[in-house]
Image (spheres, helix red, strand yellow):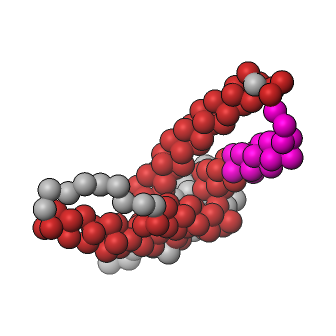
């Protein structure tokens, strides 16, 4: 008897190992690099603050304000590290903390005082348009890519996968 030439080839019904996790999207790589740079800059500033306090320890009068400043720096450092770790390890809460980080960065760029000097009104209008229209749109697009896109959903759905 000859085999049927129109029958599908034999294939295994299951894989030999666990499925490979989804690759990390570019938007998440960008967020991780930005958070890493922010963390490094923040730690450098905190080290400078601690060095300043240590060099003027005898002149300090308000230890309560000092304690609040140190506690604030420790909490920001913990939040930055937790956000990076959560995103890197594909945790759902890391996904939402990443969106919060993008929204915070967008708010910072929109709400900080504009000290740029422009040569004429056309440059001023372009700077205003870029700062208050295009940048928020780019941040919104980035937030969507990190949190709600199909690639991000696949990336964060593999929370139990090694990563």
**On the rendered structure, is 149 left or right of 94?**
left
Question: Residue drawn 48% across and 45% down?
Answer: 33
Quadrant in which residue 115 is drawn: bottom left
For this rendering, which residue is in front, 28 or 131?
A: 131
Question: Residue drawn 42% across and 67% down?
Answer: 110
**On the rendered structure, is 60 left or right of 7?**
right
What predominant SS class does the magenta segment belong to? helix
Residue 26 drawn above or below residue 63: below
- The extreme top residue here reads 55
Q: How many marks?
A: 0
Quadrant in which residue 127 is drawn: bottom left
**On the rendered structure, is 78 left or right of 5?**
right
Question: Residue drawn 86% across and 41% down?
Answer: 63
For this rendering, which residue is in front, 14 or 130?
A: 130
What is the x, y in percent for residue 117?
Answer: 25, 54
Observer able to see residue 106: no
Quadrant in which residue 94 is drawn: bottom right
Question: Residue drawn 59% across and 33% down?
Answer: 44
What is the x, y in percent for residue 109?
Answer: 43, 61
What is the x, y in percent for residue 157?
Answer: 61, 68
For this rendering, which residue is in front, 162 or 129?
A: 129
What is the x, y in percent for residue 150?
Answer: 46, 73
Residue 61 colored magenta?
yes
**On the rendered structure, is 7 left or right of 163?**
left
Residue 144 drawn above or below residue 119: below
Q: Magenta stretch?
A: 60-77
Which quarter of the image is occupied by the N terminus? bottom left
Residue 122 colored magenta?
no
Observer able to see residue 77: yes
């Amino acid at each position: 008897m000859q085999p049927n030439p129109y029958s599908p080839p034999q294939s295994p019904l299951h894989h030999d190992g666990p499925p490979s996790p989804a690759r990390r999207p570019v938007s998440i790589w960008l967020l991780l690099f930005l958070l890493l740079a922010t963390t490094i800059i923040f730690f450098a500033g905190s080290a400078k603050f601690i060095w300043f306090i240590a060099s003027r320890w005898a002149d300090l009068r308000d230890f309560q304000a000092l304690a609040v400043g140190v506690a604030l720096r420790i909490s920001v450092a913990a939040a930055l590290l937790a956000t990076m770790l959560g995103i890197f390890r594909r945790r759902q809460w890391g996904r939402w903390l990443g969106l919060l980080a993008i929204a915070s960065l967008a708010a910072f760029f929109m709400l900080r005082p504009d000290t740029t000097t422009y040569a004429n009104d056309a440059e001023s209008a372009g700077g205003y348009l870029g700062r208050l229209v295009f940048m928020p749109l780019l941040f919104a697009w980035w937030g969507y890519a990190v949190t709600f896109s199909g690639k991000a959903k696949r990336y964060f759905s593999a929370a139990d996968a090694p990563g």
